[in-house]
Image (cartoon, rainbow, N blue to C red):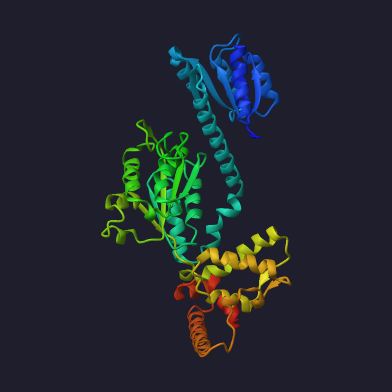
C-alpha cells in the first residue's frame, strides 16, 4: 500500500465517493470530508500528506481552508479543484499556499500525475532532511582531509562557488568524490532546502537519455504508455547534478545547451514549452577539450558548463591525506560494523601510503572496510589488507629493486627532515612549510622514521 495519505474535501457526495474510491484503488490512505471544518478536524488528528479540496464549500471556503491548513501544518500539500470558468479562484488559492489546481470535472489521469509529482517532491524533501542530519559526519568529510594544499584549494573554490548561480564543472578521476562535492556545494548554497537530483548519463542508453533529462509525453515512443517528468522538472528550484556529462549524446547536448541559455525545454514528443529554474553542476573524468575537435562534444556547451571549474585531485597527489582518510573510515566502519578496531599498525599504514590507488578515495574506503571486518584484533595489520597491495618480500627481483629504492628514499627523506628541523631550530610548523608538506604529515614521517 502507498504510505501517503490524501484528505479529500467535497460537499458533493457523489464526487467525494468517486475520488475517494479511485485514490484507494491507487493505494493511497484516503480520508473523506464533506466540509472544511470536518477536514480540519481530520488534519489535526492524522498525518496528512496531501489535501484535495473543492473551492466552493459550505461554511469555510476553499481559500480559507488552504490558509488554515498552512497554519496547522505547512508540510501538507494542498490541491484545489475549481470549475473551468473560475480559474481566478485557483490563482487566489495558489497565492494562499496551494501547490496546484485541477479543473472540474476532474480528469483522473491528470489527478494521478499531480499526486505523483507531489509524492515525489515529499520523498525528495524527506531525503534532503535525512541528508541534512548526516551532514555533520558526511559533508564535513572534506574538512577532515585538508592536510594537502591541492585539496584545500579545491574545497575553498567549492565553498565560494556555492553561493552563486553559476554552472560548476567538476573534473576528476573516478572515485575522487565528485558527487560528494556536488552535494556539498548544493547544501552550502541558497537552494539547500530544494531538491538535489543526480543523474549519471554514462549509465543510460542513448535512446533513453533525452527522456531521463527532459521527460516524455504519452506515446512519444514505443513503451511510453504515460507522461513522465524528466530530471530538469524534478530539480526545479534546486540543483541538478549530471555525472559523466562527456557521455551525453549530441542530440541531447543541443537541448541541454538551450536549457542552460533560456531555461526552457519540451518533453520528448511534446509541444508545451516548460521552464526550469535549475542550478546545474556537471562532472566528468574525461578531457572534454579533446572531444570537441573529434565532433563528440559541442564547444559552445563546453564553455557554458566550464564557468567554474573545480579539479578534484586523485589520492596519489595528496598522500598526506591517506592517514586522515584511513582514520575517518576506520571510525565510521568501526561503528557501523560494531567492531572494537581502534587503529592501523605502522606496517599496514606504510603499505597504505605507498599504494597507487587507481580507484582513489573509494578504493581506500573499501580497503579499510574490509580490514575492519576481517581484523581479529583491535589493530589493523598487514594480514588484514588485500593481498595485491601488500609488500611481500622476495617475490621478484623487481620487488627487491623497489625495496632498494625505498631504502634510498627513506634515507633521503630522513636527511631532508633533519636539515629542515635544524634550520628552523626545531620548529615543526616552519620545517613543514620549508619542505612543502603539512605539519601533520611531518609529524607522521618523524614518528615513522624514529626522529625525535
Which image quadrant is residue 56 in?
A: top right
Count of marks overlaid on the render: 0
How far across and down, in percent of the image, does residue 324 sit? Answer: 57, 66
Asked if 380 appears above or below 241 in the picture, the reply is below
Asked if 94 appears above or below 139 in the picture, the reply is above
Report the residue at 60% width, 9% height from top. 58
Looking at the image, the residue that sits furthest to the left is 293
How far across and down, in percent of the image, does residue 330 sit? Answer: 64, 65
Asked if 55 appears above or below 169 in the picture, the reply is above
| Image quadrant in which the C terminus is located | bottom right
Report the residue at 31% width, 49% height from top. 301
Q: Is residue 325 visible?
A: no
Looking at the image, the residue that sits furthest to the top is 58
Would you say 84 lies left or right of 327 here?
left
Looking at the image, the residue that sits furthest to the front is 222
How far across and down, in percent of the image, does residue 223 sit? Answer: 46, 40
| Image quadrant in which the N terminus is located | top right
Front residue of 394/13: it is 13
Report the residue at 55% width, 66% height from top. 363
How far across and down, in percent of the image, does residue 290 sit? Answer: 30, 62
Front residue of 206/330: it is 206
Asked if 75 appears above or below 87 in the picture, the reply is below
Amino acid at each position: 500500500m502507498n504510505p501517503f495519505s490524501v484528505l479529500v474535501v467535497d460537499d458533493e457526495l457523489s464526487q467525494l465517493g468517486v475520488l475517494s474510491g479511485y485514490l484507494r484503488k491507487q493505494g493511497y490512505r484516503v480520508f473523506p470530508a464533506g466540509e472544511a471544518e470536518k477536514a480540519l478536524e481530520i488534519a489535526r488528528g492524522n498525518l496528512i500528506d496531501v489535501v484535495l479540496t473543492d473551492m466552493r464549500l459550505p461554511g469555510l471556503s476553499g481559500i480559507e481552508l488552504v490558509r488554515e491548513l498552512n497554519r496547522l501544518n505547512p508540510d501538507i500539500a494542498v490541491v484545489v479543484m475549481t470549475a473551468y470558468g473560475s480559474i481566478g479562484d485557483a490563482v487566489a488559492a495558489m497565492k494562499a499556499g496551494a501547490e496546484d489546481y485541477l479543473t472540474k470535472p476532474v480528469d483522473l489521469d491528470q489527478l494521478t500525475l499531480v499526486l505523483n509529482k507531489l509524492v515525489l517532491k515529499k520523498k525528495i524533501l524527506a531525503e534532503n532532511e535525512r541528508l541534512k542530519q548526516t551532514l555533520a559526519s558526511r559533508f564535513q568529510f572534506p574538512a577532515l582531509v585538508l592536510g594537502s594544499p591541492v585539496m584545500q584549494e579545491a574545497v575553498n573554490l567549492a565553498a565560494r562557488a556555492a553561493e552563486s548561480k553559476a554552472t560548476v564543472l567538476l573534473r576528476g578521476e573516478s572515485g575522487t568524490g565528485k558527487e560528494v562535492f556536488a552535494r556539498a556545494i548544493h547544501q552550502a548554497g541558497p537552494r539547500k532546502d530544494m531538491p538535489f537530483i543526480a543523474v549519471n548519463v554514462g549509465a543510460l542508453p542513448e535512446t533513453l537519455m533525452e527522456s531521463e533529462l527532459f521527460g516524455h509525453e504519452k506515446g512519444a515512443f514505443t513503451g511510453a504508455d504515460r507522461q513522465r517528468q524528466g530530471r530538469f522538472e524534478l530539480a526545479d528550484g534546486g540543483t541538478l547534478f549530471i555525472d559523466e556529462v562527456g557521455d551525453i549524446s549530441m542530440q541531447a547536448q543541443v537541448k541541454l545547451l538551450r536549457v542552460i541559455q533560456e531555461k526552457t525545454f519540451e518533453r520528448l514528443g511534446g509541444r508545451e514549452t516548460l521552464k526550469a529554474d535549475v542550478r546545474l553542476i556537471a562532472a566528468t573524468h574525461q578531457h572534454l577539450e579533446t572531444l570537441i575537435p573529434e565532433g563528440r562534444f559541442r564547444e559552445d556547451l563546453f564553455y557554458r558548463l566550464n564557468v567554474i571549474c573545480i579539479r578534484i585531485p586523485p589520492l596519489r597527489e595528496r598522500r598526506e591525506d591517506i592517514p586522515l582518510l584511513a582514520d575517518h573510515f576506520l571510525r565510521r566502519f568501526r561503528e557501523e560494523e560494531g567492531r572494537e578496531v581502534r587503529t592501523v599498525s605502522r606496517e599496514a599504514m606504510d603499505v597504505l601510503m605507498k599504494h597507487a590507488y587507481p580507484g582513489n578515495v573509494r578504493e581506500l574506503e573499501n580497503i579499510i572496510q574490509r580490514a575492519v571486518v576481517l581484523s581479529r584484533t583491535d589493530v589493523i595489520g598487514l594480514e588484514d589488507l588485500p593481498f595485491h597491495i601488500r609488500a611481500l618480500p622476495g617475490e621478484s627481483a623487481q620487488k627487491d629493486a623497489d625495496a632498494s629504492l625505498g631504502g634510498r628514499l627513506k634515507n633521503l627523506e630522513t636527511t631532508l627532515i633533519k636539515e629542515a628541523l635544524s634550520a628552523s631550530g626545531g620548529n615543526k610548523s616552519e620545517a613543514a612549510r620549508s619542505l612543502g608538506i603539512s605539519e601533520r604529515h611531518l609529524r607522521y614521517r618523524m614518528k615513522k622514521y624514529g626522529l625525535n
